[in-house]
Structures are given as structure tokens and as C-alpha cells.
Image (tube, rainbow, N blue to C red):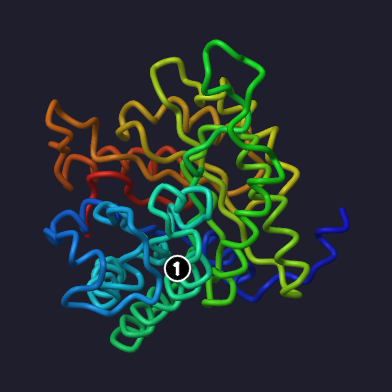
Amino acid sequence: MQAFQIPPSDSLGQLERLARERILILDGAMGTQIQNLGLSEEDYRGAGGCGCRHHSDHPQKGNNDLLILTQPEALEEIHFNYAMAGADIVETNTFSATTIAQADYGMEGAVDDLNTEGARIVRAALDRATAIDGKPRFVAGAVGPTNRTASISPDVNDPGYRAVTFDDLRIAYGQQIRGLIRGGSDIILIETIFDTLNAKAAIFACFEAFAEHGRRLPVMISGTITDASGRTLSGQTPTAFWHSVRHSRPFTIGLNCALGASAMRPHLAELAGIAQTFTCAYPNAGLPNAFGQYDEGPEDTAIQVADFAREGLVNVTGGCCGTTP
């Protein structure tokens, strides 16, 4: 494939070597850590932090990505704490940093800054940690699924309707990925995939951006199984999911979110049995309770994830919703 004529970045070789030596550790949940800060609408807009040159009439509380620009020191400390807790790979706080997702907040114009600065904040946190213990660490530019699906109609009365096109997604993802590369990301992590067509648009955008950059970054791809059916929202089994994205030759393929480790295990085992690359899993801290909180503690999650390791199911593991340093 012409895309693979692009020279790989140094980080790809480093990560592959490390993943052959041991299981690598990914960081944990960002949203829960942000919730613990107890930020107000004014804080999201920059009170007590940094002024934001991007403005919107929409409420911003809940727009966690915006904190990259308005509360960078608080975010850097969260990233630093994950690094010092043992994370080899730390994600940017850019899950919703596309024009598509930011449209809900009227912050489409902030996307370039969100991704560039989001990667720079993580790099600064990791450099601080490495200065202490000398361990190499990697910035994973997080690319979320957006709040649109290219495969399913949002209108039950019009099954042929789509709220977004492949090109809409490709363009939005491309803008995000270019910003993440510009900010110093070592990896692009396409995560929480519920619709593989969205993921394919992100993969396409990756290789367009890599061609411009002149280097091919490692790509991590992580789907989400939405319920007991063992399928993604767009209907794919783990095996079908792998075959749909294997052309991208990802550094890792895996699963995250939606399920705790115990419920994720059979789906991860299926994926690990078929995938011809490294595997990654970062489950939630169990399932949320009636109040949306996660009752599973670190020790509980650790015991279950340790089983993943003993059974040879993972090369990279970490935590998703409800997990902590």
C-alpha cells in the first residue's frame, strides 16, 4: 500500500520493542479526574486559569476539552499523576476536539488550538516525570468517535438518512490529527469506536496527515462493545471489527469503555485470538451504579486485568471510565 511507503516515526520502533519486552501501561479516566476538580462554568471559561481567545454564547461547563486552554495547569497535573503512577502512554484530553463534537458548544474555531495545546500539555507532564525517573513515555493523541454515526440513521422514520458523511468525518478528523501531530503526539489513538465507518474515516485522515508530516505515527485502534450482544453499536463482532480495520496495520487493536474488565474478557479473548498485531484493553471500573458512579476500586479492577495479562490477552492495558491513578 502506498500509505506504508511513508517512513515510520522513531516512536513506532521504540513502542514495538517495548511491547515485545513487557506489557505497556496506558493511563486511566480523564473525566472522573476533572469532575473531582469541582469546576464551575466560570472555571471552564477561564476564571482562575488562563483567558481563552475563543468565545461562544453556549454554556461551556462539561466541555472538558476546553480546559486545555482555560485550565492547563490542572490538566498537566492529572497527566503527570498518571505518568508517575506508572503509565507508559498518556492520552491527550482531546476526546471531543473535532469541529463536529465542538459544534455543541459553539467552539468549532478552537479545534486547532485544543489539539496542538492538548498534546503539548501531555508532553510537558511526561517530560517532568521522565526527568525524575528516566523512563521513556509516549503521548497518545486521543481521537474520539464524535457524536455522529455514519452507518446508522438518527431518524427511525427515515432509515436512509445520515447526520454526517464519510467526508465530513475525514475532514474533521484530519484537522484534529494535524493539530495533535503539531503538538508533539507520538501515537494517534482512535478510541471508543461504536461505528467502524467513523473509524475508517479517522484512519484515512491519519494517513493523509502522515503523508504531509513525512512520518507515519503508530496508530492504536480501540472499539467499544455496547452491550451483552458482544457487538459494536453498528453491529460488528470483535472479529468483524478487526477485519474492517486491519488494512491500517495498527500498532494495537483493542477494546475500551462500556464494560468492566470481567464483561469485556470474552470479547477481548476473541479479538486477541484473531488479530495479527498487539492488543490493548482499557476497561471501565465495572459498570456504573444507579447514580452514574463507579463502585469498583483499583484493587478489584487490578485483579481482573491481571488475568488478562496471565492469559496473554494484552500487550497494552490501562483504565477507562471510573479508573484513577
The residue positioned 29% from the left and 56% from the top of the image is 60
Q: Residue 231: x, y in percent?
A: 51, 22
State which quadrant residue 172 falls in.
bottom right
Q: Residue furthest top?
A: 157
Q: Residue 324: x, y in percent?
A: 21, 54
Describe the element under mark 1 as helix, strand or loop: helix
Relative horizontal placement of residue 233, taking residue 91 as reference (left or right): right
The answer to whether residue 261 is above or below residue 70 is above
The answer to whether residue 73 is above or below residue 271 is below
- Residue type, mark 1 in image: Leu
The answer to whether residue 263 is above or below residue 257 is above
The answer to whether residue 128 is above or below residue 264 is below
- Mark 1, residue position: 114
Relative horizontal placement of residue 112, taking residue 64 as reference (left or right): right
The residue positioned 24% from the left and 45% from the top of the image is 302
Q: Residue 294: x, y in percent?
A: 17, 38
Relative horizontal placement of residue 201, taking residue 193 as reference (left or right): right
State the quadrant of the C terminus. bottom left
Front residue (pair 155, 147): 155
For disc 1, the neighbor class at 10 Å (few under 14, some 14 to 19, many from 20) is: many
Front residue (pair 204, 164): 164
Q: Residue furthest front?
A: 57
